[in-house]
Image (tube, rainbow, N blue to C red):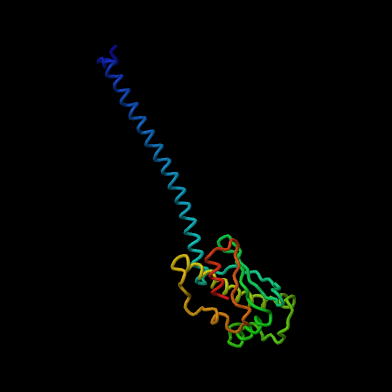
Amino acid sequence: MAIGEKGVSSERAEQLAKVMTSAKYRLEKKLGQNLRLAEKHQIEAKELESELKILQSDLEVAFGTKEFKVSLLHKRIGAASYIKGRCWWHGKQREVQIGSIKAVLDRINTMIRQGEYGDLKIVENGDLSWSELKSDEALVEAVKDIGRARLRKYILEKLLSEHLDSDHEVPGSTPDEYDSGLDVSAHLDAIEVNTDEWYVRWRRENR
């Protein structure tokens, strides 16, 4: 049976239908593949975006262009008690030992004499209690600054181990230099959840 005024044969029409249907299936298959590929790339792009944000934040924290919140705690360790600084980084709690109240106050007084805290006065009473120290907002912020510097050092060394090699050291930031003015027991003592091999080595080297 012919189709159309000039009589296109049914065989030719059937052949055309088969060719076009085959082309349709090929396009549908290709479209499906491309859509799945596009979805995969979207997921990868979101993951890369997330990694980029973390990397940018790490750069800002490690090199001091971004401040981060630090909370203070007062803990007893054996017969002595120490102030500790705590923050969150990469979804984990990080904690560093700042020092005994007396050692920290000595450190702050030294910094005041060196002109680093123009708004603070020398703390005459080196035997302040924890509650007395906490009641002085300016003093608390000065202690947080010390804790923040110690946490930043920890983060910087962690990033060095991840991006360079585990033996790389931060120039001018060995424990003795870093803890100048504090007692021996106040050496950096970072604690994180899910302790790993790197951290065990880091803590041993920074005692």
**Residue 18 coordinates in the image, percent (x, y):** 32, 23
Residue that appears at 52% across and 72% down: 64
Figure quadrant of residue 183? bottom right
Residue that appears at 57% across and 74% down: 150
Establish if 126 lies above or below 12.
Answer: below
> In the rendered image, which quarter contains the C terminus?
bottom right
Q: Is residue 161 left or right of residue 71?
A: left
Q: Is residue 51 left or right of residue 5?
A: right
Residue that appears at 43% across and 41% down: 36
101 or 120, which is in the foreground? Answer: 101
Establish if 139 lies above or below 1.
Answer: below
32 or 12, which is in the foreground? Answer: 32
Q: Is residue 131 left or right of residue 10?
A: right
**Residue 94 coordinates in the image, percent (x, y):** 60, 66
**Residue 35 coordinates in the image, percent (x, y):** 42, 40
> In the rendered image, which quarter contains the N terminus?
top left
**Residue 206 coordinates in the image, percent (x, y):** 55, 75
Residue that appears at 50% across and 61% down: 54
The single residue placed furthest to the top in the displayed view is 1
Q: How many marks?
A: 0
